[in-house]
Image: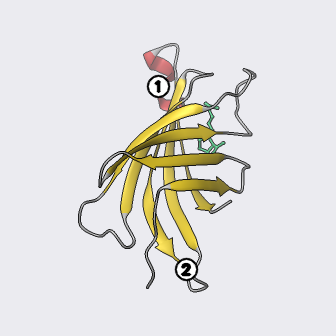
Amino acid sequence: TGKCVLAGNWTNDLGSNMTIIMNSKCNFSGSYSTAVSETPEKIEKSPLRGSQNYRNLTQPVFGFTVNWTFTDSVTVFTGQCFVDETGKEVLKTMWLLRSHADSIKDDWTATRVGTNVFTRQ
Ligand SMILES: CN1C(=O)N(C)[C@H]2CS[C@@H](CCCCC(=O)O)[C@H]21
């Protein structure tokens, strides 16, 4: 199997784009631009930071956090970078989107979960 490299540009089916810059062997930063949001605020690029695991550098597992700049929420992603049967790099991820809750009574409704696949632009 080929090597899947996390660094660079990725896009998903929701029209989001992200850029990943490896800062060291296993830690990275970057930015996330989303086309859709559930908030009326003007959407802006938001920073992301994360890590990939030390052991398998051919199809690495990873996690990262997007700290949304335009609304009071954060998303944490975790997943793996694969090379599929056609030789394409694919990020298979699951995410948790935590929105701000006004009161602890509303805590139960403040976290959304989903899956998402990223491919090269
Ligand atoms: C566009 N999205 C995307 O590319 N996802 C993988 C999902 C998980 S992060 C969410 C966007 C959250 C924006 C900030 C907010 O509305 O609170 C959605």
**Which numbered tag is attached to residue 84?**
2
In percent of the image, x 48 and y 72: which residue is there? 82
Residue 65 sits above or below residue 92 on the image? above
Position of the C terminus, as image quadrant, is bottom right
Q: Nearer the viewer, residue 18 or 115?
A: 18
Residue closest to the far left: 55
Decide if residue 2 is on the left or right side of residue 60.
Answer: right
Q: Residues within 10 Å of mark 2 (few under 14, many from 20)?
A: few
Which image quarter has ligand 1? top right
Residue 27 sits above or below residue 79 on the image? above
Decide if residue 75 is on the left or right side of residue 22.
Answer: right
Q: Position of residue 95 (x, y in %)?
A: 50, 48
Query: Mark 2 or mark 1: which comes first in sequence?
Result: 2
Residue 44 sits above or below residue 51 on the image? above
| Residue 33 location, quadrant | top right
In percent of the image, x 24 and y 67: which residue is there? 55
In percent of the image, x 61 and y 22: which residue is there? 71
Kindly state the secondary structure of the residue where label 1 is placed. helix
> Spatial distance from mark 2 to mark 1, Cα to Cα?
39 Å
Q: Which residue is mark 1?
A: 107
Q: Nearer the viewer, residue 12 or 72?
A: 12
Q: Amino acid at mark 2?
A: Asp
Q: Position of residue 85 (x, y in %)?
A: 56, 86
Q: Position of residue 42 (x, y in %)?
A: 74, 22
Q: Is mark 2 within 8 Å of ligand 1?
A: no
Q: Amino acid at mark 1?
A: Asp
Count every numbered label the image shows and give the total: 2
Q: Nearer the viewer, residue 102 or 115?
A: 115
| Residue 1 location, quadrant | bottom left
Q: Position of residue 90 (x, y in %)?
A: 56, 68
In percent of the image, x 46 and y 59: which residue is there? 6
Q: Nearer the viewer, residue 77 or 87?
A: 87
